[in-house]
Image: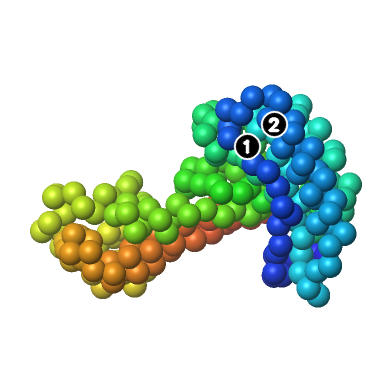
Amino acid sequence: MHIQKVLGSDIAMCFDQCPPGDAPQDVQEVALARTTAWAARCRRAERAEGQALFGIVQGGIDTPRRLRHMAEITPLDFDGHALGGLAVGESVEDTYRVLDEVAHQLPADKPRYLMGVGTPTDLERGIVAGIDMFDCVMPTRNARNGYLFTSQGRVNIPNAQYRTDLGPIDPACPCSTCGTYSRAYLRHLYIAKEILYSRLATLHNLTFYARHVRALRDRILAEGQRA
Ligand SMILES: [Zn+2]
């Protein structure tokens, strides 16, 4: 399947085993063998028409082990490939090192998906390393917990400093929450445990993430035109 077609499909992920970041060697090896065996079974299983299937590369923070697993997964001819088992408790430095050493070695003609990541900075690092897709609870869960991303840094809406703040969450944000409601009102909704807060805050954080990724895409396109 062409990349655009894959991204427009229902995507199914292979079953995999994701050990904790600090799991000992023997646990990692058992997880890898099981993940490879499950990948082969998933590949043979019947699928809905048009449904894409992605293989998952595990291997923790050990690059040779990651590459060995990649060599087991990629010949199975999936529609795309995911890196699993990152951002599961290892240091950020290790996450970025593995990304830099491994992501660009995944087949370039199929989407590359980094599972469960991450912060706006993580997304940027992933994209620079060659990743095409992400998924993460961070924008929505953080929104519900009072934690808002803005162009001027993070806003922790429960803080007392926002009690009488009549400005928007982010003056640079075009979302309907920022265009309509003040920080003081959103803080009031949050403190009152009013469910509307979650909805408005989620709208804002998702807008922030979408604009962040769009800006990165524009930079890539601009650099491509200069090249
Ligand atoms: Zn907004």
State whether residue 115 is above or below residue 181: above
Examine the image and state in which quarter residue 124 appears.
Answer: top right
User: Which circle marks residue 37 in the picture?
Assistant: none
Amino acid found under the numbered disc labelled 2: Gln
Q: Marks 2 and 1, how far apart in space?
A: 7 Å
Nearer to us in this view, 140 or 99: 140
Q: Residues within 10 Å of mark 1 (few under 14, many from 20)?
A: many
Instruction: State the residue at coordinates (49%, 61%).
Output: 210
Q: Position of residue 23 (x, y in %)?
A: 61, 29
Q: Image check: 75 left or right of 38?
A: right
SS under mark 1: loop
Q: Is mark 2 in CB contact (under 8 Å) with mark 1?
A: yes
Instruction: State the residue at coordinates (74%, 34%).
Output: 30
Instruction: State the residue at coordinates (70%, 47%).
Output: 16
Q: Residues within 10 Å of mark 2 (few under 14, many from 20)?
A: many
Examine the image and state in which quarter residue 105 appears.
Answer: top right
State whether residue 12 is above or below residue 104: below
Decide if residue 112 is in sight here. no
Q: Position of residue 216 (x, y in %)?
A: 55, 52
Decide if residue 187 is in sight here. yes
Question: Which residue is most to the top?
Answer: 25
For disc 2, the marked residue is 28
Q: Position of residue 106 (x, y in %)?
A: 77, 43
Work out which quarter of the rendered image holds the N terminus and state it: bottom right
Q: Image check: 218 left or right of 1?
A: left
SS under mark 2: helix
User: What colouring does the structure picture have?
Assistant: rainbow
Marked residue nearer the N-terminal end (2 or 1) = 1
For disc 1, the marked residue is 19
